[in-house]
Image (tube, helix red, strand yellow):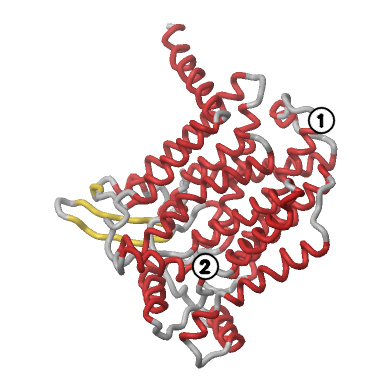
Amino acid sequence: MQKIITLPARLFERFSDRLIWLSEHPVFGVMAIVLISFASRFWNLDGTADVVFDEAYYPKFAQSYLHGEPLFDAHPPLAKYIIALGIQIFGYAPFGYRCMTALAGSFLPLVTYEFIWQLSDRRGWAWLTGCFVVLDGLLLVESRFGLINIYILLFGMLSQLCMVLALKRSRQRWFWTIATGLMLGASFSVKWTGLAYIVGLFAIAGYAWSRYRQTLNAAQILIGLIILPIAFYFVQWIPHLVINPERDIWELHRQIIGFHQNLGVGKTEPIHPYCSPWWSWILLIRPVAYFFEMRPNSMVQFVLAMGNPILYWLSAIALLICITLLIASKLRFPPKLITQIFAKEQSPMRSQLIWFMLYVTSSFAGHWLPWILSKRCTFLYHYMPASVFAFAALALLVSLMWRSPLQEMRMIGSGIFVIVAIGFLFWLPIYIGLPISSGYLPMLMWLRSWI
């Protein structure tokens, strides 16, 4: 009886050790991220309808740019230019206006991995963060259609990566500072919400100064991080203004601001059935249905823009733990559990970890909390930039568990990874629109508010 009980534990212990080994060997670990990322984003990319959700707008805008036709869009044009490139190459068809977004979504986990690695020199944390980005459902759904939100994340995370490289490589500092400014400008040239990545740049700069006494000089800050992003933003409007000469840049921005301010104002009921308040996103209360179609033989094809519930809920707990740790570090009274997690960390490394937690929590707050001020109809996909930092918080804690001298703690960390992966596979049919039985669909709808 004892052998029967301990055999599964021993097998999982071996699996946990192999998982930790994979995270520390980038050739194999990164190959796994690449394979899953590209396969899940590009598989059967044109297999779900011709128009899904806001594809009613953005591919048409992109086509208008190609044909020189006037248009009004409530967001800056950069992402539509990129979608137009795919249409130019593959034609105005689902694959044509989805392929560039799928490419951006495929690279996002790799950029996130490289950023965390360059920031921390911790392979485990970097690999886990990249994996969690791959295993999130909302990021997957947004990467598979002609939508624009994924570009905010790709350019925003590239700005964080370039900032780290600018501070680490003094001989190439000007080059990477300019790259940081361009990527930051590109992020808020997709949507203005990309400006929130400035919070992360400040946190990175503070970390580099406190630990390495490395900083940008005044000229690099002024030119690279202020003038260049603003210049990029205004230059990218030129093709749009050429096509729409009846409005100058200032009148155009007044109209855009008015559109967002008045969206749904004065209405007693939400203007869209999937509107959700900012505070509900972290709990995954109200996802967004992008597509639904009945198929023969009681089958349905359903695409639900919903995060991986296991990943979302565990990430929310991880954020609370990180905040608790930050407060405890100030009070110099770390909880016993935290002491166990930090058991393998030397005192200077603990100070470094506090900085990492400060970075992920402040960046998360910078992307999430400003939505408190919004009075318009908001959706779960507005949470996407913040969600990556929540995943990074969870990945950091799991990576610390993997570094623990206690085998039980390492196995708990591996268990967290496994149930996140199981959650991704469990809800995968409604992320990529696989035909499923109408009787099976209710099993995937754990909360009534998901329907």
**What crowding class fits label 1: few (fewer than 14 Cα within 10 Å), some (14-19), or many (20 or more)?**
few
Residue shown at 51% from the left, 79% from the top: 263
Residue 110 in the image: state x and y as whole percent. Answer: 52, 45
Quadrant the C terminus occupies: bottom left
- The type of residue carrying mark 2 is Thr
Does the image show residue 380? no
Disc 2: which residue: 378
Asked if 421 appears above or below 444 in the picture, the reply is above
Q: Is residue 378 left or right of residue 274?
A: right
The tag on residue 332 is none
Label 1 secondary element: helix
Residue shown at 41% from the left, 66% from the top: 85
- The type of residue carrying mark 1 is Ser
The tag on residue 347 is 1
Residue 398 in the image: state x and y as whole percent. Answer: 60, 33
Does the image show residue 7? yes
Q: Spot the residue most to the bottom.
A: 246
Of callouts 1 and 2, which one flags the residue occurring earlier in the amino acid sequence?
1
Residue 123 in the image: state x and y as whole percent. Answer: 61, 34
Label 2 secondary element: loop
Foreground residue, 380 or 366?
366
Asked if 74 appears above or below 407 in the picture, the reply is below
CA–CA distance in space, label 1 to label 2: 43 Å
Quadrant the N terminus occupies: top left
Foreground residue, 240 or 364?
240
